[in-house]
Image: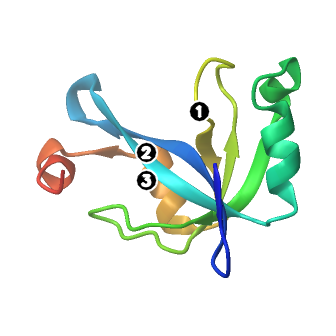
Amino acid sequence: MMQVPGVGAFVRALLPVQLDGGFKVTYGLWLGIHPDQLPQTFAVWWEPEYADLRLDGVVANEIAPWGLFPTPATATVRDPDHTPYITTSPDALLTNVLTQTWPHEDVLAHL
């Protein structure tokens, strides 16, 4: 987590992408959140309430090959021992990234 004066508040999140053949790659990204959410997020990060954390924000960096900056997204906790995962988005492209299976060549060439 971080807050950059004059820029915004950000939380790390994971973006899982399914690849052909049953493989997957997981991107680490920054989710831009409203600054008012940051203190509460910090307060529950190591607490049992973390399991219920839901963060609405925007993808705050480019994710190749799709771009995705600044795309609205929601991150939720799948496992209390992991960083939150991007799980939904009202954006069609990000929804496709989350739900489709992608050819290795189209994704891994950009890593």
Viewer-nearest of discs 1 and 3: 1
| Disc ID at residue 97 | 3
Name which residue type carries label 1: Thr
Q: What amino acid is labelled 3 in the image?
A: Val
Closer to the eye: label 3 or 2: 2
What amino acid is at disc 2? Gly
- Give the label on residue 83, or none: 1
Q: How is the image coloured?
A: rainbow
Taking the image as shown, residue 66 lies to the left or right of residue 45, namely: left
Q: Secondary structure at mark 2?
A: strand
- Contact between labelled residues 2 and 1, with CB atoms less than 8 Å apart: yes
The answer to whether 105 is drawn above or below residue 31 in the figure is above
Residue 28, numbered label = 2
- For disc 2, the neighbor class at 10 Å (few under 14, some 14 to 19, many from 20) is some
Q: CA distance from mark 1 to mark 2?
A: 9 Å
| Distance of label 1 from label 3 (alpha carbons) | 19 Å
Sequence-first disc among 1 and 2: 2
Counting residues from the start of the chain, the first of labels 1 and 3 encountered is: 1
Side (left or right) of 108 relative to 50: left
Count of labels in the image: 3
Give me the residue at 69% from left, 19% from top. 80
Query: Compared with residue 85, is residue 57 higher up or lower down, i.e. above or below?
Result: below
